[in-house]
Image (spheres, helix red, strand yellow):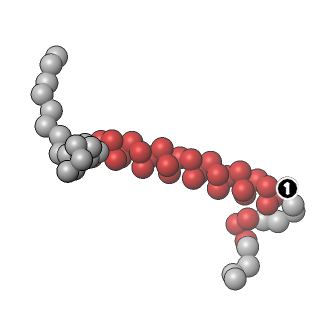
Amino acid sequence: MEQEVLLWCDPQGKTYSTPEEVIQTMQAELEAERQRAERLAEYVRSLGVDPDNLPEL
């Protein structure tokens, strides 16, 4: 199925992201941060510290 799509461009001709592209990018970033947080929590656990009960700083 063929479909025409209109895109907004900045003055230099670079197209702006569509809402779907923004959502995909944000989901990928969130997943990467979730994985990073889990790795950090595992490291902290390996040091004998419970990451769910850290003192307030």
Which residue does the numbered mark 1 point to in the structure image?
Answer: 46
Residue 38 % position (x, y): 67, 52
Q: Is residue 18 visible?
A: no
In percent of width and height, residue 43 lies at 79, 55
Q: Is 34 displayed left or right of 38 in the figure?
A: left
Q: Residue at x 27, y 43 (%)?
A: 14
Q: Is residue 8 left or right of residue 27?
A: left
Image side of residue 15 versus residue 47, left or right: left
Extreme bottom residue here? 57
Residue 44, given in percent of the width and then of the height, sits at 79, 60
The relative height of residue 27 versus residue 4 in the rendered view (above or below) is: below
Identify which residue is drawn at 73% across, 79% down: 55
Element type at mark 1: helix
Residue sitting at x 85%, y 55%: 46
**In the image as oriented, which residue stretches furthest toward the top?**
1
- Total marks placed: 1
The image quadrant where one finds the C terminus is: bottom right
Q: Please indicate, yes or no, whether residue 55 appears anywhere in the rendered image.
A: yes
Residue nearest the observer in this picture, 48 or 35:
35
> Looking at the picture, which amino acid does disc 1 mark?
Ser
Q: For residue 52, which quarter of the picture?
A: bottom right
- Residue 45 image point, x, y percent: 81, 58
Residue at image coords 16%, 16%: 1
For mark 1, does the 10 Å Cα neighbourhood hold few (<14), some (14 to 19), or many (20 or more) residues? few
